[in-house]
Image (tube, grey):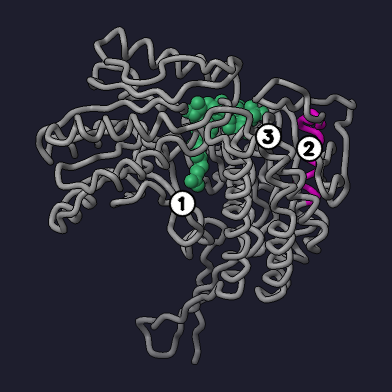
Amino acid sequence: MQLDDPTLLREHALIDGLWQSADDGATLAVHNPADNSPVAMVPCMGVAETQRAIFAAQAAQIEWRARSGKERSIVLRRWFDLLMQHQTDLAKIMTAEQGKPLAEAKGEIAYAASFIEWFAEEAKRLDGHVLQHPQADKRILVLRQAIGVTAAITPWNFPAAMIARKAGPALAAGCSMVIKPASQTPLTALAMAELSLRAGIPAGVFNVITGKASEIGGELTRNPIVRKLSFTGSTAVGKALMAQCADTIKKVSLELGGNAPFIVFEDADLDAAVAGAMIAKFRNAGQTCVCANRILVHDAVYDEFSHKLRVAMQALKVGNGMDSDVMLGPLIDDKAIAKVQEHLSDALEHGAQLLLGGGLDALGGRFFQPTLLSHVTTAMKIAHEETFGPVAPLFRFYHEREAIDLANHTEFGLAAYFYSRDIGRIFRVAEALESGMVGINTGLISNEVGPFGGIKQSGLGREGSRFGIDDYVELKYLCVAGL
Ligand SMILES: NC(=O)C1=CN([C@@H]2O[C@H](COP(=O)(O)OP(=O)(O)OC[C@H]3O[C@@H](n4cnc5c(N)ncnc54)[C@H](OP(=O)(O)O)[C@@H]3O)[C@@H](O)[C@H]2O)C=CC1
Ligand SMILES: O=C(O)CCCC(=O)O
């Protein structure tokens, strides 16, 4: 990997400020999805180590929450600076375990760091309210207090950003956190943990444990000390974790699957729409919960748009993310390849036409060709399930209402995108779309300032933005009488 700072490559978990092995010495291998070569080993931990991390987080939180917002802010700001200082090394670690092109990995480190910077600033603004009581001699004070020990379970597709988007607000509010990163991408999380120590985040406030998902997740959801769980990942696992949290009535935030529509109206700027579709579809090789999963194009511009999109897709270079000009890395694992192939064959069997790609790249392994399909309909799996791969399916529509109905015809509601230059239509469609986020004339909606999150079965809660800290605080109401 040729890191400037090789000590960022950690092969132990961080509990209570100490780098630890699993109690029984068990390990998990991390592989590079580009060639399946081994990258490193991390501990394979279970219930006992998770309990220790929770106890450490409980003890550490007392002193952390007692600090002023400004004091916590200074420490978080140092963490942000260190993340940016080590951006290239962190990106190399990410590309080695996740596969995304190095330039994208660097972009993700900056994106992750932006949440730490943002919430370092928000730490100073955790204000309460003074309300009028119905009786003149009383006042109502509302405090916003840290919820306590929190837990996070994060996915492999954004190994840094999904941690920062949860840890930033948690630590800013005065909570402590135990994180279980995805087993396929724990190294970025551990490198971030190393930098958290260097930044001066106290032992026990930020813990990262690696290992058996069901054991660690079981303890994080069962243990009454943990007061909140934030999860990003598949809808199936999110539902199970939410049910597991019911027994101890934990606050839950879920950022789950999506099935984003990307609508191109007949009045769209087609070149801009193609540029937006390329970002919304092919970022992280299509493995993003906000990826355009269904591209709906008005009949009047269908042929021109599909031609332009095809030309743009032909320029995508597939390859190992470490190579400088690569734009599309490998998919994460063989299961991901199988899912993309299944969606593709199902679509072709039901009448879709292949305009580009259609199978594994000449490089083999987990490299999939950018693939364009036309004549896609709602009779196909691809219309209903997240493909999580580089397949762009084109649907045809004739009327605005039809496009809205098609877009909303899903149990998911995370992101939606549309291109139009008609101001009336922009408001009509934006308000009618059933999703937590809408990109209008843009294919990129992710940043630290906007509230990220979904409705319907795409999840609960919002991350990032000034609203993101709300999930990590409880309101406490003080009634002051006798004034
Ligand atoms: N919303 C999103 O951003 C994401 C959506 N997905 C969707 O999900 C599909 C499958 O991806 P997959 O990686 O399997 O996603 P998962 O939901 O299985 O994994 C996400 C995280 O949950 C953990 N996890 C898995 N099972 C449990 C459990 N029983 N208890 C506690 N934690 C658990 C995983 O740990 P471990 O890695 O150790 O198994 C990982 O840390 C993708 O194809 C995509 O459609 C996937 C990732 C992100
Ligand atoms: O796919 C995801 O789960 C992470 C969202 C990526 C983003 O923040 O844009």
Residue receiving disc 3: 185
Q: Position of residue 438 (x, y in %)?
A: 32, 49
Element assignment for label 2: loop
- Tell me if 309 is positioned left or right of 24 in this view: left
Q: Position of residue 425 (x, y in %)?
A: 15, 52
How busy is the neighbourhood of tag 1: few (under 14 within 10 Å), some, or many (20 plus)?
some
Residue receiving disc 1: 446
User: In the rendered structure, which disc, 3 or 2, sits on the residue that comes first in sequence?
Assistant: 2
Question: Whole-Å distance between the Cαs marked 2 and 1?
Answer: 28 Å
Element assignment for label 1: loop
Majority secondary structure in the magenta region: helix
Task: Judge whether residue 238 can be spotted in this image.
Answer: no
In the picture, which quadrant includes the N terminus? top right
In the rendered image, residue 47 lying in the magenta stretch gets the answer yes
Question: Start and end of the magenta stretch?
Answer: 42-56
- Tell me if 385 is positioned left or right of 192 in this view: left
**Is the residue marked 2 within 8 Å of ligand 1, measured from its CB?**
no
In the rendered image, residue 261 lying in the magenta stretch gets the answer no
Marks 3 and 2 close (CB-CB < 8 Å): no
> Which labelled disc corresponds to residue 1?
2
Give the residue drawn at x 22%, y 20%: 375
The one nearer the camera, 99 or 52, is 99
Give the residue drawn at x 46%, y 14%: 359
**Is the residue marked 1 within 8 Å of ligand 2, measured from its CB?**
yes
Q: Position of residue 335 (x, y in %)?
A: 55, 17
Most extreme residue toward the left, as rendered? 399
Note whether 382 is above or below 418 in the view shown.
Answer: above
The one nearer the camera, 250 or 118, is 118
Question: Whole-Å distance between the Cαs marked 3 and 2?
Answer: 15 Å
Give the residue drawn at x 85%, y 31%: 22
